[in-house]
Each structure stands twice: as C-alpha cells, then as structure tokens.
Image (tube, grey):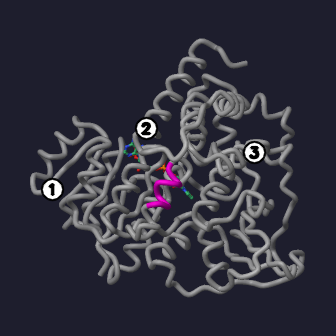
Amino acid sequence: MMKVCLLGASGSIGGQTIDVMLKNKEDFDLVGFSVGLRTAFVSKILKKYPNVKHICVKNKEDMDSLEEKYPEVNFYYGDSGLISLIENCNADMVVNALVGFVGLAPTIKVLEMNKICCLANKESLVVGGEIINNLLKQGKGTLYPIDSEHVALAKCLAVDNKKVDKIIITASGGAFRNLTRRQLTHVTPEDALKHPTWNMGKKITIDSASMVNKTFEVIEAHYLFGYSFKNIGIMLNYNSYVHSLVLYRNGEYRLDCGKPDMRVPIKYALYQGLTPYKTVVTKDLSSIKGTEFGVFDIKRYPAVKFARTVIKNKGTYGAVLNAANEVAVNAFLDHKIRFTMIEKIISLMMKMHQSISHPTYEDIVKVDRQTRETVNYLIKEGGIK
Ligand SMILES: NC(=O)c1ccc[n+]([C@@H]2O[C@H](COP(=O)([O-])OP(=O)(O)OC[C@H]3O[C@@H](n4cnc5c(N)ncnc54)[C@H](OP(=O)(O)O)[C@@H]3O)[C@@H](O)[C@H]2O)c1
C-alpha cells in the first residue's frame, strides 16, 4: 500500500488523481493533502478519506475555522505549510498538482526527503530543472512526470531509446489554432478558456492558447530525457489522440495513442511506470487512423523560441520566463492586458535579464520576485505596448 500526499487536491489534476486512487484503493491510501482557496474540497475529500490527519490550506483564517471543525486533524497553511505537510504526513509518494512557482519548493523537499515525486507541476522543472536533476543525480528521490506528452515519451523511450533522432511533442494548437496572429489581438479570456480537446485549470488553458504550455513542455522534456533543443520537435495533432512520438534514425516513428484523458498518465505515474501499455510503430504517420497531423510553424507560435533560450543558457532564464508568464496570464484573465501582450512581456523580460549560472533555490526566488515586481510595474504604468 502506497501512502500518498496530494498537493493541489482541489484542482483539475488533483481531482483526477483522487479518481484514480479511489479506483485502486487496494494500492493507494491518502495520508495528507493540500487545497488553496477552495476549502470546500476539504470536507468532500475527508468524506472519501476520513483517516487523513494532515491538511494544508492557503490562508490562516481558513486553517483556523477548519481546526475548529476537525480538531483531530493537523492543519498547516501557506507556502511553509506545504513543506510542513510533506515533512509530517509520512507519505511514500507526493503528487505535486499545484499550479505555478509555488510548486518548486515542495518538489525539492520531496526529493531531498528521498521520496517519490509524481510531478504535474511542470513549472518546477521550468524554473528549477538544474536543481531537480542534481538532486536526482545524487540519488535523492525519484521523479515521474504527470503530463500526457512526457508520459507518452517515457513509454516510447522505455521500449526503445536507441538511435533516436528526435523526440516529438504533439500540440493541439490551443483555443486559437484557427486564427491568424493578427486576429489574436482582440481575443478575450473567455475565448482563451475554451480548449478544443482538454478540460484543465485556467492557467494551463491560457498557456495552451499562447503556446507557452508547449514552450514549458519542451523545457520539461529536456530536463526529463536529456535531449537538446534541436532534438526536441513539435508536431500538431488536432484531436490530441497521439500524445507524443519518437522518431528513430531509420525513419521509424513510435507513438503513444489514446483518447485524451489525464487519468491515464496519472495512473502511469502513480504506478511508477509499471502499468501495461502498447506503443505503435510506423514509417507513415498518415496510416494512423482517426487522427491528423500538421506542421508546427514557429512563426505562428514564436513563444516556443523561449524554450531555446532557457535550454541553451539555463541559469535563471526559466525563472524569468515563468514569473513573467504567471503575472501576464493573471493580468490577461483580469482584462488588464491584451492576449498578445503575454508573449511581448515575456520577450522583454528575457531580453533584459542578466542570468545567474547554476542558481541556488534562493537565487531563483530572488529572480522570480524581481521579475514579478517589474512586470506588475510595467502593466500598472502601461509601459508595454
Ligand atoms: N489540468 C491538466 O489537464 C494538466 C495536464 C498536464 C499538466 N498539468 C499541470 O498540472 C499543474 C496543475 O494544473 P491544474 O490544471 O490541475 O490546475 P488547477 O485546476 O488550477 O489546480 C491547481 C491547484 O493548485 C492549488 N494552488 C494554486 N495556487 C496555490 C497556492 N499559492 N498555494 C497553495 N495551493 C495553490 C489550487 O488550489 P485552489 O484552487 O483551492 O485555490 C489547486 O488545488 C499545472 O502545473 C499544470 O501545468 C495540468
């Protein structure tokens, strides 16, 4: 029986993780979890898992009222509370389904404690990929991604990782795939939140529309599988049926296919890559029935170039990319900036940045804070046109 701690239990990945765990009750038990502001999930989850004794929420006031209602539970709050939750709940495995920069410190903590980390929080790898990989190289902890593309790549590479020409991440094209760049100027948050194939949290849905999500996934793939930017391709696959593929030097492709359902990669991570699966091999992608591919045009989706800067230069570029994006996405959702400003803000911040090589966690926190301050200031003063 695997004792699981679930961070971000009130979110899209968090909820689907609970679904998978409930279907496999003989293998997984929940010993701790966190929610952010949606504290109504605490009682819902406790009904399913009444023995949980460790819970973290975002705000102290919420913690205080929950403590009165559930005196037998240990409550924690805030960013430091997430760390205390991991330290105290005695889990074997932590599923990190938090969104954003807040996920980095918990990922590091889980690995430092030599535990298994199932990582949906891709921002952890974007901002702290070097730190995470150093911990793994030192033999600290184990990491399994929860992202459909990376689980697909892990599956294909587990079957055959020799003579690989490219690993290829598939992209649906996001909510605005049928629009020209010019037409993007006037799109609204409501338009951007309509993803064509996946039902996800707000931030990743906006990131999918702007292609920053694919940018993140290229960086994630680099840190997970060790391929350079030029050996990581992107291909459009309109109905998200092919989750990703590997191209071998003999011209053969190996694909992982299936209908879009995050419970599949979640299950694969929870079972540490030991669920049975089948990959498909072909030299002719048009022979794959029920799906269609398209060429990924970097001129249409230039945000992916940010991945090249992060992978080639490393340092604190990832922290700048992520912080600028998080602030810009929130400003767009609040109708403070246009959609096309997200990319412009990131580009400006990355150009201005003086990177710190081999950053410590503290360096990353500092760059994250400075970037947020600058972007907030620029947005407030209308300094980016
Ligand atoms: N959704 C998908 O299909 C999908 C697929 C692949 C990868 N991912 C990745 O998985 C991660 C989670 O995505 P999601 O779509 O599940 O997001 P989501 O639905 O927005 O859920 C995010 C979770 O994080 C919590 N949270 C946010 N900020 C927090 C903070 N400051 N302190 C404590 N908790 C906080 C939220 O709590 P409250 O809501 O209670 O405030 C919620 O539980 C992201 O990194 C995303 O890129 C998602």
Neighbour tally class for label 1: few under 14, some 14-19, many 20 plus, Cα within 10 Å? some
Does residue 115 appear left or right of residue 179 in this picture?
left
Q: Is residue 96 above or below residue 27?
A: above
Q: Secondary structure at mark 3?
A: helix
| Magenta-tinted stretch | 128-134
Q: Nearer the viewer, residue 315 or 143?
A: 315
Residue located 19% across and 45% down the image:
66
**Would you name the residue on which mark 1 appears?**
73
Q: What's the CA distance linking mark 1 and mark 3?
A: 47 Å
Does residue 141 appear left or right of residue 153 in this picture?
left
Q: Position of residue 152 (x, y in %)?
A: 64, 73
Residue located 58% across and 48% down the image:
204
Residue located 29% across and 67% down the image:
48
Q: Position of residue 78 (x, y in %)?
A: 29, 41
Q: Quadrant of residue 79?
A: top left
Split into 4 quadrants, where in the image is the C terminus? Answer: top right
Q: Secondary structure at mark 2?
A: helix
Q: Position of residue 40 (x, y in %)?
A: 31, 48
Split into 4 quadrants, where in the image is the N terminus? Answer: bottom left
**Would you name the residue on which mark 3 appears?**
305
Residue type at mark 1 is Val
Q: Nearer the viewer, mark 1 or mark 2?
A: 2
**Would you name the residue on which mark 2 appears?**
365
